[in-house]
Every structure is written in structure tokens, then in C-alpha cells.
Amino acid sequence: MGYILNKDQWDIVNLAKDYAEKKVMPLVPELDNAPELTPETEEGKKLLELYKGAVDLGLTSLEIPEEYGGLGQDYYTVAAAYEELSKVDAGFATAVAASSLGLKPILQHGNDEQKKLYADFLNGEKTSEKAPVPGFCAFCLTEPDAGSDASNSKTTAKKVGDEYIIDGTKCFITNGGVASVYTVFAVTDKSKGVKGISAFIVERDREGVSIGAEENKMGIRLSNTTEVIFQDVHIPADHLVGEEGKGFIYAMQTLDLARPMIGSLAVGIAQRGIDEAVKYAQVSQTFGKPIIKHEAIAFKLADMDIQTEVGRSSIINFLNKYYDERKNGRYNYSREAAICKCFCGDMCVQVALDAIQILGGFGYSREYPVEKLVRDAKIMQIYEGTNEVQRIVISGQITKKH
């Protein structure tokens, strides 16, 4: 692994690794194959226990500053920890990372009271009567008609006295059904387009907040994905994050920081593919010798390793740029974020497919873990902005330079 961390940071990464391998991994086959993982089912209850264990260890509050009760880790450590979680199960890692996604706009633009409120939810100190497990939040941006084009949001927030009233439906929301608190993006002034979108904190227990059906997904099945519906939801005016009309900017800044974290999940999937392929290639024999001794297999494994290490390096490259920009009060790292997310997303799909090819017929069977890697990998090209959108971002940055 290419991260340069100190002992305390590696302790955090190894904490995530040990929890994933000892607690999550034994349950992955059962939970991945469960028809549904609602809180009412036995499998759903087991998943909620895994979520609770992650909260208790502080995995949902890695980046929360210590003064707000978090572990105060930098994003190098967070990325390395996410990779270890994703090596075991990308769905579980997605659930943990999505709480970080909802947190980021608050850390970047919220006031002290908002940061404390959000941190208390993620630390599990503050709970929701409606949420089935403490310690999770969700980032509510996507809508049925506002996916890649988030500026087409229809959810509204109307200012009435010292309150805002929120109405609208968000879809494909990771942690939607388990979150205690939401970061919600809504239109406060339709006439201003993207400059009329604002960001809000909405607690799960607010009257008018409800959850739609859970999505039956191809992969990342250990993550919860639902609609979140807001019907005449009243929140105090002090739940506005930052300035009114700046929500779209906050969302884009959040995604720029979150996309490389998706890259770390993708690297975790790819690394697991390599590990499984090497393990199989060392024991499977053809023509009197292990298949890893055949150049065709050895070179394929080498290419898988090259691509995975380049993906990991792209995360580190982004973080170097991020910290350099932020210390100077700038946010100019969209290009590096898009490159990282796009490359890692494409890379992990190909590496997972190569792992199946090395295992042959066994790789296509659900008795072996590599077919699941392909199912999990595909979403890495889709969520947090499709890879087509990332290429639009990259090409736009290239145009600005010339």
C-alpha cells in the first residue's frame, strides 16, 4: 500500500481491517444473498449489528475533529481505512463512506453548533427514534429528474418566519433508511437556477420525513439505498448550512472531496480481486504446473497489479493537491478528483473481470467471491457522478488551460 502513515494512523487502518475481516467477512455470503435486508428480517438485523459495531469503533467519525468527539484523522488515513473495508465488502464500505459524504458539507461550511449536532449523531451520542441504528447520516442530492444534472432539483425549501418548509423526494440515497440525520439540498429561489439551491440539516425524527422502498441492487447489497421523502417538513432557520443560495457550490465541493474516497473503495475491490486470483493461480494446475507459472496468467496478474497501484497513486495525488489548495483557502482540485474517480472506477471493473477470467468457470460461480466483485465494481462507474460526467469535468479543465 502506497500510503505513508505514522503508527497511530496505521492503528486506525488496522482497526478497520480487523473489524472487516473478523466481523463482516463471515456474514458477507449470507447477507449478499439475502432477498432483502430490511430491519424486520433476520439478515437485516445482523447487518444493523455490523453497522452498530462500526459506529462503536469510530469508523463513521474518522474525519470528525477531536474537539467534536471524532478521531480527527486526515484523508490519507480515511482512504486507507476505506480500502480495507472495501476489500472485504464494498457495500459495507459504501455505507460507512456515505456517512462521511453527508458530513463533509457541514465540516466545510457549517457553524460550530451544526458541526456539534452532526458529530453527535455520527458518534452515536445523539439518536433518532425512527432510525433503526445510531451513527449514520445521508447526503440527499439526487432526485428522479436530477441525477447527473443535479441543478435540475425540484425539492423546495420555503422560508416562513423563522423556519424553512421542505417538500420533495430524493432517490438512490445511500443510508436513506438507516440515517438519523440528512444533509438536504433544496431550491430556495427557483428564479436563480443553481444559485437558488441551498443546503440544510434535517433530522430523521422531523414530522413529514418518510422512507421509500429499499432498492434491490445488483451489487453493494450490504448498503442501504432508498428514497427519502420530505412532505411539509418544518425545520428551524438555523438549520441552513452556510449561506442561502450556495448549496450547489457546497454539493460540488463535497463531491470533489468524496470522489477520491470512492476511488479508495474501487482500489479495495481491485486488490481483493488480485488476492483471490493469486491464491487460485498458485494452486490450480494445468500442463503439470501451477497456472501462475504460465506467462499468460502471470502477465495478466502483473497488469492487474499495475492498474491497482496506479489507482491508489491517483488517490494520493489528489490528496496532495487537496491539502495544498486548502491551506491556501482554495478549492481548485476538481480535475484531480475526476481523474481519480474515473480511472479507479474503470480500473476496478476490469480487474474484477480479469480475476474471473483467471478463475475460469469457478470465477463465474457464486461459490467463489470474485463474481461478487464485478457486481460491486460496476457502481464505481456510476455513483458520485458517472464516469461520463467525470470526463466532461476533465475535458472542461483541459479547455481552460489552452
Image: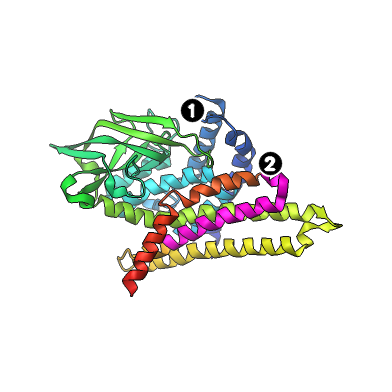
303 with respect to 265 (left or right): right
Point out which mark residue 39 bears. 1
Disc 2 secondary structure class:
loop
- The residue at the point 45 percent across, 57 percent down is 260
Q: How far apart are marks 1 and 2 (CA)?
A: 29 Å
Q: Position of residue 97 (x, y in %)?
A: 46, 47
> Is 179 or 253 nearer to us in this picture?
253
Residue 231: image quadrant is top left
Occupied quadrant, residue 156? top left
Main SS, magenta residues: helix
Query: Which badge, 1 or 2, comes first in the chain's sequence?
Result: 1
> As drawn, which residue projects farthest toward the top?
40
- What residue sits right under mark 2 in the picture? 365
Residue 240: assigned label: none
* Residue found 38% across the figure and 41% down from its top: 138
- Residue 380 image offset from top left, x and y in percent: 49, 51
Where is 341 relative to 233, above or below? below
Can I make out residue 58 in this image?
no
User: Considering the image in quadrants, where does the N terminus appear?
Assistant: bottom right
Identity of the residue furthest to the right in this view: 288
The answer to which quarter of the image holds residue 114 is top left
Disc 1 crowd, CA 10 A, few/some/many (<14, 14-19, 20+): some
Side of 94 where 157 appears, left or right: left
Amino acid beneath label 2: Ser
Tell whether label 2 touches label 1 (CB within 8 Å).
Answer: no
Three-letter code, disc 1? Pro
User: Magenta segment: does it hold 238?
Assistant: no
122 left or right, relative to 307: left
Spot occupied by residue 285 in the image (x, y as percentages of width and height): 82, 54
Is residue 45 visible to the viewer in this orientation of the structure? Answer: yes
Magenta span covers which residues?
338-367
Q: Quarter holding the C terminus?
A: bottom left
